[in-house]
Amino acid sequence: MSVLVGVLLALHLIGWAVALGGLVATMKKPTILAGVLHGLYLALVTGLAITGVAGAQDWDLNYVKIGVKLVVALAVVALAIVGKNRPEKVTTGYLGGTAGLIVVNVFLAVLWK
């Protein structure tokens, strides 16, 4: 099972990287690319799958941390969906805020023990 968790974790990180890269790449002409949404969906689904697999193996999980990370991830997905559906609302600040929340989520994962 540790191989499965490793594969899910790699896909999770790739999803965040795709989303962050897509946001940063479009800063000059602010827009939400479809690839950003795909990366966010991948990160969200694999994060939930990691939690499910790890919980089934009786790992010691910090559910408060998982809950906070889930709320931040859902906020990022919501911002991306709104930005995709209402492109006139997307500004450089909007993209920066969304990218900042992605960075916050990564820092929560790494620094919160």
Image (spheres, rainbow, N blue to C red):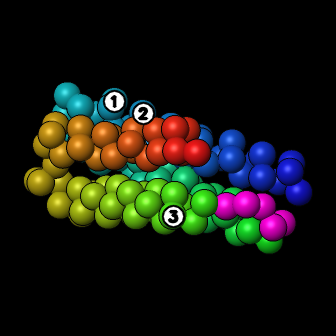
Q: Residue at x 59, y 40 (%)?
A: 14
Classify mark 3: residues with Cα within 10 Å, few (<14), some (14-19) or many (20+): few
Above-or-below relation of 79 to 16? below
Eye-nearest disc, 2 or 3 = 3
Depth check, front residue: 44 or 35: 44
Q: What is the x, y in percent for residue 71?
A: 40, 64
The main secondary structure of the magenta stretch is loop
Classify mark 2: residues with Cα within 10 Å, few (<14), some (14-19) or many (20+): some
Classify residue 12 as left or right of residue 95: right
Asked if the residue under mark 2 is in contact with the one under mark 1, i.e. CB atoms within 8 Å, the reply is yes
* Residue at the spot of label 1: 25
Q: What is the x, y in percent for residue 62?
A: 60, 60
* Residue at the spot of label 2: 21
Mark number displayed over residue 45: none
Above-or-below relation of 94 to 86? above
Q: What is the x, y in percent for residue 99?
A: 32, 40
Q: Secondary structure at mark 3?
A: helix
Eye-nearest disc, 3 or 1 = 3
Above-or-below relation of 71 to 113? below
Depth check, front residue: 105 or 12: 105
Asked if the residue under mark 1 is in contact with the one under mark 3, i.e. CB atoms within 8 Å, the reply is no
The span shown in magenta is 57-61
Reply yes or no: does residue 100 show up in magenta: no
**Is the N terminus in the top left, top right, bottom left or bottom right quadrant?**
bottom right
Depth check, front residue: 83 or 109: 109
* Residue at the spot of label 3: 64
